[in-house]
Image (cartoon, rainbow, N blue to C red):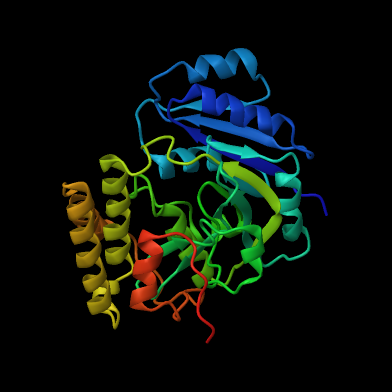
Amino acid sequence: MSLTVDVIVPVYGNWALTKDCLDHLRRQSIAHRVIVVDDAGPDDTAAQITAGYPEVTLIVLERNSGFAAACNHGITAGTGDIVVLLNNDVQADATLLELLIAPFTVNPELGSAAPLLFQPDGTIDAVGLCADPTVAGYVRYHGATLADLTIPEPTLLGPYGAVAAYRRRALDAVGLLDEGIFMYGEELDLALRLNAAGWHTTAVTDARGVHLGGATSGRGSARQRERAGFGRGYLLRAWGIMRGRHGVRALTTELIVCGGDLLLSHDLAATRGRLAGWRAGRAASTRPSRAPGIDRSIGLIESLQLRVGGYRRRPRR
């Protein structure tokens, strides 16, 4: 069974990164369509693509709308059976797309797939996402080595946003990325909704690439921490966590995280973001009552460790 593939690349400036990303996509081993969405970026990315990459479908937005909105514009402009969201700071191996979509051809219930991404230093950046009972999401295997892939990790919930493959039919069923979130947390929310609707996910560790990371907001910058906080506050409200049995744990965790961020960064970026996200989450559509893919074995202490550190081997249970 042959599946068509749309690769959506949302961009905001950083033409050098985008060029490198597109050059890697040109070397892919299977046919695909590339759709670049220029989110009202400050440089000449659109002109550069028009001049040098005629095979690319280019969408230029008039105002900066955020990651989720940019991706959604690209998704709706395409027709491929499989949609691959790809950050412009990812260098895809030549076989990444071919290997990543292969499981979709044999499992009609597969809604999403996650590749193995490395950091520039050779350690693992991500093999998808997991989530704890407060719907806090964590990148799986971050900072680990290939040898660690044999060690049990928290349950895979869905793909990480740097490279995420979805069956278009699954997206049609549950809806696209929530544009109420500007950046950070939208792929976690989509993974939760797909999981709740019964769509399967898988990790494809032979599909590989390098994720440079932090290219748009700046890794660890106040803007990044505020936007990440916004996504966290938004999801806490959208998924009704504070009203449920894990509300006290969620509140305790967020107080610890915000307090630690204040001590380390000497600003209230994380707190401001959470409060703004909480207010915005009031307008979110109703979410399912449960998502079976949440890993309920992740306790409070482990969740705090996952937030502040890299990969840790879990103790034998």
Q: Is residue 164 left or right of residue 216?
A: right
In the picture, the quarter occupied by the N terminus is bottom right
Residue toward you, 197 or 23:
23
Q: Which x, y percent locates residue 313? A: 52, 71
For image coordinates 46% across by 25% down, the residue present is 14
Q: State how many labels appear.
A: 0
Q: Position of residue 23 (x, y in %)?
A: 66, 27
Q: Nearer the viewer, residue 281 or 227?
A: 227
Q: Where on the picture, by quarter, is residue 132?
A: bottom left
Using the rendered image of the protein, determine whether residue 98 is visible from the camera's viewpoint. yes
Residue 250 placement (x, y as % from top left): 27, 72
Residue at the farthest right position:
1
Quick one: which residue is furthest to the bottom in this view? 317
What is the quadrant of residue 40 in the picture?
top left
Q: In the rendered view, would you say 101 is above or below 247?
A: above
Q: Position of residue 257 (x, y in %)?
A: 25, 62
**Above/below status of 17 relative to 75:** above
User: Is 224 left, or right, of 210 in this rendering?
Assistant: left
Res. 167 visible in picture = no
Q: Which residue corresponds to the image point at 36% horizontal and 60% vertical from the top-left? A: 308
Residue at the image position 60 percent from the left and 27 percent from the top: 20
